[in-house]
Amino acid sequence: MLKVPLLRRNQVEQVANDVLRQHGLTSVPINPVTIAQKEGFQINNAKFSDDSLLGMIARRPGNLLMLIRAEDSPNRKRFTIAHELGHHFLHLLSDGEFIDHEADLFREEYVEQDTPQMSENQRAEVQANMFAAALLMPEEHMRHFWQQLRSIKKMAELFGVSEEAMGYRINRLGLATNEQ
């Protein structure tokens, strides 16, 4: 059984920042496909028999695979890939897999940290979502561009994410309420 570590948000953010630095990605929009390919993943669009499936990641000896729902928008696919990378960097330290449903990725989970009361699956999904947000919308870039743009729509376009994801990230970083 997978043991998912109890990580604080700042720890997940640090892992995402380390991954960006390790892969030399310093400007937005961040391309999660670049990271996945450098990590050795084969990424395929998939038509799942279950319409609620968004993506999956599998690690087997000598094989790293990501399947992403083919009919999703480019921004949705980018977030799903970043989410799956979260599982890769935070949870899949040995062979195994994660299968993600819409309910997992769209979870209203924006708590400051996960808690011991969460199930292993909930903890893994919360952390993968935090990782995806930090990877695609790095805090340093968010603070810099928010000062210039002051628009969720423009920020979402610049970072290549949905307005909903951008709104959550702006809120989480306190940008709309604080004059940074």
Image (cartoon, grey):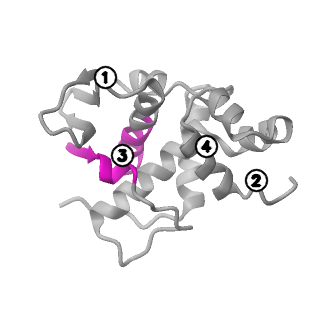
> Cα distance, mark 1 to mark 3?
15 Å
Label 3 is placed on what type of residue?
His
* Residue interval drawn in magenta: 82-106
Q: Residues under labels 3 and 2: Cα distance?
A: 27 Å
Q: Which residue is mark 3?
A: 87
Disc number lying in front (2 or 1): 2
Which circle's residue, 2 or 1, is located before the other in the chain? 1
Foreground residue among 151 and 174: 151
- Residue 170 is situated, as x and y percent measured from the top left of the image, at 68, 50
N-terminal-most mark, 1 or 3? 1
**Quadrant into which the N terminus falls:** bottom left
Crowdedness of circle 2 by 10 Å Cα count: few (<14), some, many (20+)? some
In percent of width and height, residue 131 lies at 49, 47
Residue 35's disc number: none
How much space separates mark 4 and mark 1, taking CA atoms? 25 Å
Give the residue drawn at x 80%, y 41%: 150
Please tell me whether mark 3 sits on a helix, a strand or a loop.
helix
Residue topped by disc 1: 43
Mark 2 → mark 1, Cα distance in angstroms: 34 Å
- The residue under label 2 is 175
Instruction: Identify the residue shown where x is 41% and y is 26%.
Output: 73
Residue 166, numbered label: 4
